[in-house]
Image (spheres, grey):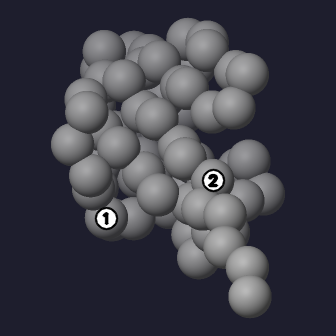
């Protein structure tokens, strides 16, 4: 079972490592902070607890802010 990950210049198929693998698990594996990333699953905004399913397209968007 796999999904497509899109993040910055990454556009690749990744294996789903276990059942109930969530966006939060993915962010942890990539060493990214949920506070600076917006996640989309198949084009829809989703929360960290969303489970990644086979053939999903997961897009991670870096939030840029300043002061």
Secondary structure under tag 2 reads strand
Total residue callouts: 2
Badge 1: residue crowd in 10 Å (few <14, some 14–19, many ≥20):
some
At x 55%, y 26%, the residue is 6
Label 2–label 1 contact, CB within 8 A: no
- What residue is shown with label 2? 62
Q: Is residue 17 above or below residue 29?
A: above
- CA gap, disc 2 to disc 1? 15 Å
Residue 28 showing in the rendered view: no
Q: Residue furthest front?
A: 67
At x 54%, y 33%, the residue is 17
At x 39%, y 65%, the residue is 48
Picture coordinates of residue 28, whole percent (x, y): 67, 59
Relative side of 22 to 65, left or right: left
Q: Quadrant of the C terminus?
A: bottom right
Look at discs 2 and 1 and give the one toward the viewer: 2
Classify residue 43 by image quadrant: top left
Picture coordinates of residue 24, whole percent (x, y): 50, 61
- What residue is shown with label 1? 47
Secondary structure under tag 1 reads loop
Q: Is residue 49 above or below residue 42?
A: below
Q: Quadrant of the N terminus?
A: top left
Residue 53 showing in the rendered view: yes
Identify the disc placed on residue 35: none
Picture coordinates of residue 18, whole percent (x, y): 47, 38
Relative side of 57 to 61, left or right: left
Relative side of 35 to 46, left or right: right
First along the sequence among labels 2 and 1:
1
Q: Is residue 7 above or below residue 27?
A: above
Of residues 9 and 24, the one nearer the viewer is 9
Badge 2: residue crowd in 10 Å (few <14, some 14–19, many ≥20):
some
At x 70%, y 21%, the residue is 10
């Amino acid at each position: 079972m796999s999904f497509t990950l899109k993040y910055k210049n990454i556009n690749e198929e990744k294996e789903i490592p276990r059942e109930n693998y969530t966006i939060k698990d993915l962010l942890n594996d990539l060493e990214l902070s949920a506070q600076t990333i917006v996640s989309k699953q198949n084009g829809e905004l989703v929360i960290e607890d969303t489970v990644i399913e086979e053939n999903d397209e997961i897009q991670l968007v870096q939030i840029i802010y300043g002061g």
